[in-house]
Image (cartoon, rainbow, N blue to C red):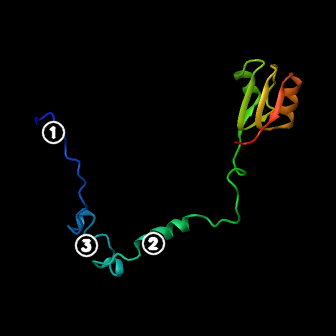
Amino acid sequence: MLTLKNIKPKTRTYSRRVGRGAATGRGNYSGRGIKGQRARSGSRYGLKLRGIRTLFKAIPKSRGFVSPYVAQKLKIMTLAELERRCAANTTIELRGTKILGNGELTKALTVKASGFSASAKTKIEAAGGKAIQCGTR
């Protein structure tokens, strides 16, 4: 049954009314400029091409190919963060992360990561853990 509670408001988008005077902001030439093919009625040639062209112009010229997997930036984690977050004698797998040697490590951890700094590797092994390098993904 249709009542005032059931009626939904109109959700209709109206097309922009152009050429209704200077005060509307779309008066005079109705947003088409003064002369030319795009100012005339009927012909809409070149608009799609024009949109694609500006897209191409916005993209910088690429000089060679770089694989997105090779150019992938690694996240960074320090030994101080590992000391704070992880319990002793655990295995942590951090793909896409490089471990840096800032801080001290007192727990024996087995860390699998995409990269290690030289100081981080020596500190992990000195604490009785293992530093295993794995892939980036």
Task: Give neighbour class at mark 2: few <14, some 14-19, many 20+ (Cα, 10 Å).
Answer: few
Report, in whole angstroms, how far the alpha carbon at label 1 lies from the one at label 3.
Answer: 40 Å
Rendered location of residue 50, percent (x, y) = 45, 72
What residue appears at the point 30 percent right and 79 percent down from the top-left corner?
Answer: 40
Q: Identify the mark at residue 117; answer none if there is no mark.
A: none
**Amino acid at dot 3:** Asn
The quadrant in which the N terminus is found is top left
User: As displayed, is residue 105 above or below residue 132?
Assistant: above
Report, in whole angstroms, how far the alpha carbon at label 1 lies from the one at label 2.
Answer: 44 Å
Q: Earlier in the sequence, mark 1 or mark 2?
A: 1
Q: Residue furthest front?
A: 1
Q: Identify the mark at residue 7; answer none if there is no mark.
A: 1
Residue situated in front as seen by the camera: 84 or 24 = 84
Viewer-nearest of labels 2 and 3?
Answer: 2
The quadrant in which the C terminus is found is top right
Residue 85 placement, left or right of 12: right
Task: Give neighbour class at mark 1: few <14, some 14-19, many 20+ (Cα, 10 Å).
Answer: few
Residue 125 placement, left or right of 54: right
Q: Identify the mark at residue 50; answer none if there is no mark.
A: 2
What residue appears at the point 69 percent right and 66 percent down from the top-left corner?
Answer: 63
User: As displayed, is residue 72 above or below residue 61?
Assistant: above
Report, in whole angstroms, how far the alpha carbon at label 2 lies from the one at label 3.
Answer: 24 Å
Question: Circle 2 — which element?
Answer: helix
Question: Circle 3 — which element?
Answer: loop
Tell me which corner region of the image, top left, top right, bottom left or bottom right, holds residue 25.
Answer: bottom left
Viewer-nearest of labels 1 and 2?
Answer: 1
Rendered location of residue 41, percent (x, y) = 27, 77
Please give the residue where the numbered disc 3 appears in the rendered image.
Answer: 28
Q: Earlier in the sequence, mark 1 or mark 3?
A: 1
Question: Circle 1 — which element?
Answer: loop
